[in-house]
Image (cartoon, rainbow, N blue to C red):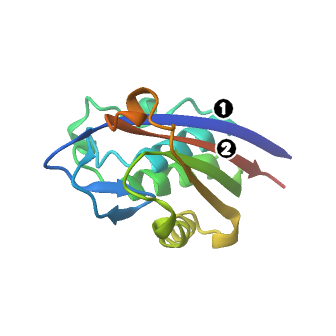
Amino acid sequence: MIRVGMGYDVHQLVSNRDLWLGGIKVPHTFGLLGHSDADVLIHAICDALLGAANMRDIGYHFPDTSADFKDADSKILLAKVVELIGTKGYRVGNIDATICAERPKINPHIPAMQQCLAQVMGIDADLVSIKATTTEMLGFTGREEGISAYAVALIEKD
């Protein structure tokens, strides 16, 4: 059996924060604001995986009202999500994700993100597709007020 889920996340860009995307620290003058490390890509992937397994969303499992997740490394949350879907007999089939940002340039960092995320999920890096786009200077992303990410996940059960 296979199932598909879709995830979306957005975080505001602010000064005095590190920029974490896809589990790696990306050099930039701004970082993303959030209760955890605000890794918008990982959060979208978590929601896609949870949605595919019909297990609600990342905020349900890791609420921003909990001190346990304050400044949490999102790679830990992703590993827990993979464990959660495993309790229903599912494993990750593949991920297809898109990061929307005007700056910094994302493409040079994609191979490192793929390797990192694949390792966390216990899958081959070829099963993690990451793309980057801008919004052609339109909307909050275009004004560089924030970064968003979309993800689709396929999960499988024997």
Q: Amino acid at mark 1?
A: Asn
What amino acid is at disc 2? Val
Q: Residue at x 74, y 48 (%)?
A: 154
Quarter-of-image position of residue 12: top left
Q: Nearer the viewer, residue 75 or 108?
A: 108
Point out the image quarter for the C terminus: bottom right
Query: Residue 71 at x, y = what percent?
Result: 23, 48
Q: Quadrant of residue 6?
A: top right
Q: Residues within 10 Å of mark 2 (few under 14, many from 20)?
A: many
Check whether the beta carbons of the residues at disc 1 and disc 2 lie within 8 A of each other: no
Rendered residue at 41%/35% (across/down): 141
The residue under label 1 is 54
- Please count the marks in the image: 2
Mark 1 or 2, nearer chain start: 1
Q: CA distance from mark 1 to mark 2?
A: 14 Å
Asked if residue 55 lies left or right of residue 62, the reply is right
Determine crowd level at label 1: few under 14, some 14-19, many 20+ residues with C-alpha closer than 10 A. some
Q: Is residue 87 left or right of residue 119?
A: right
At horizontal 38% and vertical 51% (from top left) the residue drawn is 103
Residue 15 horizontal/vertical position (percent):
16, 45
Q: Nearer the viewer, residue 63 or 116?
A: 116
| Labelled disc at residue 152 | 2
Extreme residue in the left direction: 16
Report whether 96 appears left or right of 79.
right
For label 1, the SS is: loop
Q: 158 or 149, which is in the foreground? A: 149
Q: With 42 as the anchor, is 5 left or right in this view? A: right
Question: Is residue 24 placed above or below 14 in the rendered structure?
Answer: below
